[in-house]
């Protein structure tokens, strides 16, 4: 009888899939009981649209966090649908959300293996690239953070679509081509960065058959890719008009030195590029809320180095195009994957995030591995030297793999709960108003009101123009039964932001508890000035009637 081991030896694809799946489970098993926090609250836990399937039509007509009464630039109805299914399956139990994130990441690794194997028929390259995509600690920001499912979900549809497209071209399957077209809008409605899908389709078209001339491949690319481009144009038109909730093409929502100068954004991208490449090789000090000064000159430290790196990448694409097309494919994938978050076309209110490398790193590692085992090996003419280079390369890759795996599991622990996470982040971003305020809320949720008060006061000291920390400080004083200080801070929050509805509600409730109906009427009238409604007017009349 054939043993399982012998069966797997004869079925190497199945063995690779099983190995990738088991490794993914081992790496991310320690996330399954991590808490949910930060944007998980607005995206899922407090999002009323997610909680009720009657709101599904709103997923397609409103912004991502409309269900908590907020406005964002994001439109991700497919992501909301997945969140809604999850919420109806396990409510606020964290295990299920983390399990889904882990399974999508593993599924992406498997789809990636099939895509690379189908394209190049290089099992070792396909498996190595897949493994480094799976284990790299930069991926934790996209996998361990629940609401970042948008990254892996959109990449799932991208890789599924690319696999269908490749199969359609290799087998003349019309159905598979149509399925690849269907995957594109699904990816776009999971996350906006999927806009690169047509470029990746073109890339697959160019490299799946290197025997054809450049002119023929260019002609085929246009023939098969234009429907994807049409979908992309239609999507951009929608986001510019009826789905433009805030400012689709400028997430800063203002004109400044960065948003008004494409050149400054290019300089800044060059600076960021060196950071990204450094993190891919040596991922250390990983954290959210990374900050970097915007660059305004080519000669700023880091900018000219990044410009040289960018030129070197493009030069390598050209140099290896014929002899080592896999390197060209990988480097182009890397640049295409980075393009939507480069800030060049659309200014994003963030310069760099680790999870923005979720898709680009595929091409990076593919190019690196092929470069090591072919151009580098080719330079060693002596057989003994070739063997030595081979052993050293395998040893370095193995050490990197173990280091990356350890870093991933360690980083998962830093996402364990909000207090651990925010304190870790503050080591690298000590002046982040958002992190300090969120840490205060985490302490408040744990019942440590004194620590919460300390954090809110620290946030206010950093920026006293923002209403949020004053409101949260008011909540803390209310918990400490210091109502007069709570009232003072709620009023300050409203002064800072006259439309901050949460402080109106808290203030009105405090006055109701005190049966101070005169004050209730005053603040209700102010709230009605900001958000006029018949319901509020009726309530004001009822309160004034009670006063009479």
Image (tube, rainbow, N blue to C red):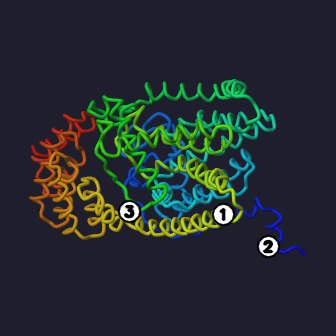
Closer to us: mark 2 or mark 1? Answer: 1
> Pointers 3 and 1 in contact (CB under 8 A)?
no
Q: Residue at x 60, y 45 (%)?
A: 330
Residue 385, numbered label: 1
In the displayed structure image, the side of residue 115 where residue 402 appears, left or right: left
Q: Would you place residue 239 above or below residue 342 in this image?
A: above
Q: Residue 12, image x and y in percent?
A: 78, 62
Q: Is residue 188 left or right of residue 469?
A: right
Instruction: Let me know if residue 521 appears in the view.
Output: yes
Q: Nearer the viewer, residue 160 or 339?
A: 339
Task: Identify the residue under disc 3.
Answer: 285
Residue name at image x 81 percent, y 38 percent: 171
- What mark, if any, has residue 5 been given in the picture? 2
- Badge 3, how many Cα within 10 Å: few under 14, some, many 20+? few
Picture coordinates of residue 320, whole percent (x, y)? 62, 41
Q: Position of residue 353 (x, y in %)?
A: 41, 50
Q: Residue 547's x, y, as percent?
A: 10, 45
Q: Nearer the viewer, residue 319 or 125?
A: 319
Q: What residue do we see at 24% from left, 48% from top?
A: 502
Q: Which of the labelled discs sits on residue 183, or is there none?
A: none
Counting labels gives 3
């Amino acid at each position: 009888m054939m043993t399982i081991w012998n069966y797997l030896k004869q079925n190497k694809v199945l063995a690779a899939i099983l190995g990738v799946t088991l490794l993914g489970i081992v790496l991310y098993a320690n996330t399954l009981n991590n808490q949910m926090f930060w944007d998980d609250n607005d995206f899922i836990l407090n999002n009323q649209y997610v909680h009720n399937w009657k709101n599904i039509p709103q997923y397609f007509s409103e912004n991502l966090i409309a269900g908590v009464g907020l406005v964002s630039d994001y439109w991700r109805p497919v992501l909301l649908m997945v969140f809604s299914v999850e919420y109806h399956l396990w409510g606020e139990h964290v295990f299920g959300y983390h399990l889904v994130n882990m399974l999508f990441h593993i599924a992406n690794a498997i789809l990636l293996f099939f895509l690379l194997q189908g394209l190049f028929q290089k099992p070792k390259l396909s498996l190595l690239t897949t493994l480094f995509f799976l284990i790299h600690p930069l991926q934790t920001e996209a996998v361990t953070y629940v609401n970042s499912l948008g990254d892996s979900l959109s990449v799932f549809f991208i890789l599924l679509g690319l696999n269908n497209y490749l199969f359609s071209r290799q087998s003349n399957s019309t159905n598979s081509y149509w399925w690849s077209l269907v995957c594109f809008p699904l990816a776009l409605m999971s996350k906006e960065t999927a806009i690169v899908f047509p470029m990746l389709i073109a890339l697959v078209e160019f490299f799946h058959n290197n025997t054809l001339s450049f002119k023929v491949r260019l002609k085929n690319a246009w023939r098969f890719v234009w429907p994807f481009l049409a979908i992309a144009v239609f999507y951009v038109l929608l986001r510019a008009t009826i789905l433009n909730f805030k400012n689709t093409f400028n997430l800063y929502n203002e004109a400044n030195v960065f948003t008004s100068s494409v050149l400054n954004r290019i300089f800044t991208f060059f600076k960021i590029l060196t950071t990204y490449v450094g993190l891919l090789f040596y991922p250390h000090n990983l954290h959210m809320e990374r900050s970097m000064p915007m660059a305004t000159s080519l000669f700023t430290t880091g900018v000219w180095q990044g410009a040289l790196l960018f030129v070197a990448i493009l030069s390598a694409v050209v140099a290896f195009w014929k002899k080592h097309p896999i390197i060209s494919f990988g480097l182009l994938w890397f640049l295409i994957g980075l393009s939507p978050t480069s800030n060049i076309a659309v200014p994003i209110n963030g310069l760099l995030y680790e999870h923005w490398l979720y898709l680009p790193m595929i091409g990076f590692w593919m190019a690196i591995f092929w470069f090591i085992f072919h151009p580098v090996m080719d330079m060693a003419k002596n057989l003994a030297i070739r063997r030595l280079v081979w052993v050293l390369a395998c040893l370095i890759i193995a050490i990197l793999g173990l280091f990356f795996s350890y870093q991933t599991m360690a980083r998962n622990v830093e996402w364990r709960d909000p207090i651990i996470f925010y304190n870790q982040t503050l080591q690298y971003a000590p002046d982040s108003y958002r992190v300090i305020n969120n840490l205060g809320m985490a302490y408040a949720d744990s019942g440590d009101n004194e620590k919460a008060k300390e954090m809110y006061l620290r946030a206010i000291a950093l920026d006293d123009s923002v209403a949020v920390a004053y409101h949260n400080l008011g909540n803390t004083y209310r918990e400490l039964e210091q109502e007069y200080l709570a009232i003072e801070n709620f009023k300050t929050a409203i002064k800072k932001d006259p439309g901050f509805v949460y402080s109106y509600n808290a203030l009105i409730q405090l006055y109701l508890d005190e049966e101070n109906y005169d004050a209730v009427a005053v603040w209700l009238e102010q709230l009605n000035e900001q958000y006029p409604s018949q319901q509020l007017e009726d309530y004001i009349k009822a309160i004034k009637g009670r006063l009479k």
